[in-house]
Image: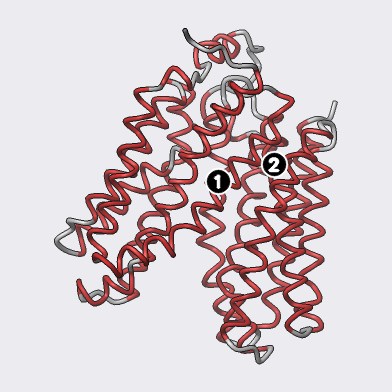
Amino acid sequence: MATTLSPAGRDARIIGIISVGHLFSHFYQLALPSMFPLMTVDMGLSYSQLGIVAAAFYVASGLSQTPAGFLVDRIGARPVLFGGLGLLAASVALMGFAPNYPVLILLAMLAGLGNSVFHPADYSLMNSAVSAERMGRAYSAHSIAGHIGFALAPPVMILIGTTVGWRSAILAAGLVGVVLVLGLIAGREALQDGHRERREAAADAPDEAPKGAGILMQPTIILFFLFFLTMAAGLIGLQGFTAAALASSAGLDLAAASAAVTCFLVGVPAGVFFGGIVADRNPASHDAIAFGGLTAGALALLPVSLLMPGSWALFGLFLAAGLFFGISLPSRDLVIRAAAPKGAMGRVFGFVYSGLDAGCALAPPLFGLFIDLGLGRWIFLLAAGFIFVSALLIRFSHRRAHRP
């Protein structure tokens, strides 16, 4: 006899399924880069060439997120999610057979195309299938799963790659994802996307509401895009260049400098966990929580540039910055959810999240220039500035969306 789940149990199952897919998305983003040291020997490629492979993935993912959002709104999130995860996993698996550099770039682009579906599809599914009172914790679990994927990829892939070779390691990683997709398809009834109901709701919306791509040209949605761009620029610059900046400007050895980055990365998922609880308990204050978390995280970075404290103080500041930033994330997504028009959740999340890719492209050359000019200590002020601007943008965007 079939077991009827309670509403909480049903929500937990849906959140779990979506979060596992998100974990694999983040795992695959670092799976191939983790193999670069082995690939340089096996394929005779330089790190610059392999960097282009990684860039091809993100360019394809960024350019495809908004079209993926339109597809989610047209045919439903579930088939788009299954198709995207399948394409991503299959492309990663086929990299194990790549005979040359051009094929590797092509497969990276196909993998990026598959990766583009996760934000529009995942958020559309959660918004339609999870109870409103648990939405903050749903976003929290989703974000934590992504961070776990990032954390797992390097040690797992390096362990397997150094044991059986990079080709076998990347093939195995891809095949696990293919098996996951087949399992999701077999149990697809557990993941209802409410597509028909959303289309009916959109049909009942006022005629003056913008349609199609016009929704994305609303000032509030543009501001959300800029929010993600500035937030990503600050965070990617911080994560990618902190070790080099501390080593060159604070006289720390590379191990201690890298430990500061680790403190930040540990703080983020811890903050996300608490941020989901805070968001669910304060449904009328999501914009204030997001603004406060981002602002506090930015302020925690200022002493690093201005004072260059010792190692233990540095570790505490980076841990605090990560914790505050993590607290903001569930409320951030709930602010965007509240502003998205009916029937347009997929395209809105797809478009605004493409700002992440834009910020990721902007940050490295800018922060790298600071390092090259001997201004490494000031990258923390630069990162704090980007993050504080993002805090102002989400606060202003929310007020604009809800003004009478």
Write the residue at 60% across / 28% down. 12
| Nearer-the-camera pick, 340 or 279 | 279
Asked which secondary structure carries label 1, the reply is helix
Q: In this view, does 4 lie above or below 14?
A: above
- Indicate the quadrant containing the C terminus: top left, top right, bottom left or bottom right: top right
Marks 2 and 1, Cα distance to the nearest angstrom? 13 Å
| Nearer-the-camera pick, 57 or 351 | 57
**Image coords of residue 186 (percent x, y):** 34, 23
Q: In this view, does 106 lie above or below 196?
A: below
Position of 226 with respect to 62 (left or right) is: right
Q: In this view, does 349 lie above or below 201?
A: below
Would you name the residue on which mark 2 appears?
Answer: 330
Instruction: Name the kind of residue labelled 1 in the image.
Output: Ala
Write the residue at 59% across / 16% down. 5
Instruction: Name the kind of residue labelled 2 in the image.
Output: Pro
Categorize mark 1 by other alpha carbons within 10 Å: few (<14), some (14-19), many (20+).
many
Asked which secondary structure carries label 2, the reply is helix
Q: Which residue lies furthest to the front in this view?
A: 1
Q: How many marks?
A: 2
Categorize mark 2 by other alpha carbons within 10 Å: few (<14), some (14-19), many (20+).
many
Would you name the residue on which mark 1 appears?
Answer: 145
**Image coords of residue 152 (percent x, y):** 47, 57
| Nearer-the-camera pick, 71 or 175 | 175
State the colouring used for the structure image.
secondary structure
Q: Earlier in the sequence, mark 2 or mark 1?
A: 1
